[in-house]
Amino acid sequence: MRLSFLQPLLDRPGPWATVYFDPGQPDESGAKRRELSVRQICRTLEQEGADKATTEAVRGHLAGLSPADDPAGRVLFATGGEVVLSHRLSRRPQEELAGWAPLPRLAPLLELCGQDPVCLVAYVDRTGADFQLREAGGPQDAGNVEGEQWPVHRAASSDWSERHFQLKVENTWEHNAAEIAEALAAAHEESGADLVVLVGGPRERRAVYEKLPETVRAVAVETEHGGRAAGSDSPALEEAIEKARQDSLYRRVEQALDRFRAGRVGTDRPTDAVEGVPAVADAARQHRIDTLLVRSDGPDLHRELWAGADPDQVAVRRTDAEALGVGEPLSVRADDALLRSAAATSADVLVVPFEGTADDIPAGGLGALLRWTYEPSPA
């Protein structure tokens, strides 16, 4: 899961109001429950010390949300009398959460926004392709490409002139496949998608697949369902895309855990994996985290860290934070501080599944794969 959408939060000092809100059902009784819920949320913020301007900004924003637009709800982050970020959830919160704290409450995002891979779907035919991005916020148009429009259809005759025409058709197909592959590679790089799904006729999608760069081909899959033509979407296509996303996520988690298991070799030689709050906080200070590993039931997620205004100002002890130049260190939750650091450095975040032995999971529920080799400090 990439947390780049949290960028607006990183340059604001806080404290922060965080609200995970379920708008309920789109009926009269749902509207009444929403009104009561908004009142309770604002009362909670006031009781925890939120200023009036920020509480009113939250109240106004929540009042404007509707189940039709946000069926699973939204998370709001507010400070200084304004809602700085409002983000759509992909899963309903089991219970609404409202709080006022030095840092935004980020850990629930891992469950409620999910870590489903960002998927770039290419709807391909002989003349071009339409691109669509699938992520937690819903499908988005990601552009299109149009190749040569003529000739694209073969003739049935075996006459020499017709065979010459068929050769032109073949050349047009090859030319268009190359253009689609080039545009798709550019869209993949721009979107940062984890997965590419090719939709269309078998010949067309295979021609595009074979012309993709190796880096894109490694994350590309084909499906026989659906096509580019209007009305060709189907439940089978949606199931195929969802299966491809889940397969991609499973592979990513397994690869990360394999690397983590290989890297957790103790403290006697360099490693590219660390675990436990002190080691992960040390990696965060040095911008070394490539992938933050989180097990949502880990006992150390709520452990105390000391933080400053900058995301890399995190320490286990208050005196260590002061040594970093933090004038007034803030007592914060470890998971929120480390997730903020991951967002600031464009690190990936993976939720570790509950299944497995102690060898499969980070100590305390927090670990990291590093961007370069880590040389352990002497004890």
Image (cartoon, grey):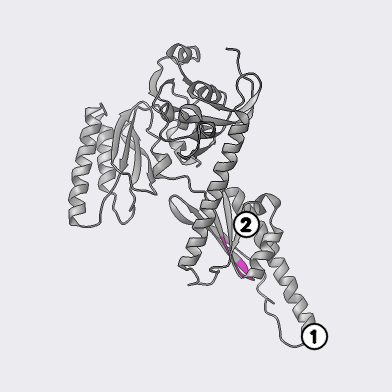
- Circle 1 packing at 10 Å, graded few (<14), some (14-19), many (20+), is few
- Across and down, in percent, residue 21 comes to 30, 43
Tell me, yes or no, if residue 141 can be seen here.
no
Separation (CA) of disc 1 from disc 2:
35 Å
User: Type of residue at label 1?
Assistant: Ser
Q: In terms of secondary structure, where does tag 2 sit?
A: helix
Which sits in the foreground, 152 or 242? 242
- What residue is shown at x 72% (from left), y 67% (from top)? 174
Report if the CB atoms under discs 1 and 2 are less than 8 Å apart. no
86 horizontally vs 326: left or right: left
Which sits in the foreground, 56 or 168? 168
Quadrant of the snapshot with the C terminus? top right
Residue at the right extreme, as displayed: 160
User: Type of residue at label 2?
Assistant: Leu
In which quadrant of the rendered view does residue 145 lie?
bottom right
The residues colored magenta run 122-128
Q: In terms of secondary structure, where does tag 1 sit?
A: helix
Q: Which residue is mark 2?
A: 184
32 horizontally vs 87: left or right: left
Tell me, yes or no, if residue 201 can be seen here.
yes
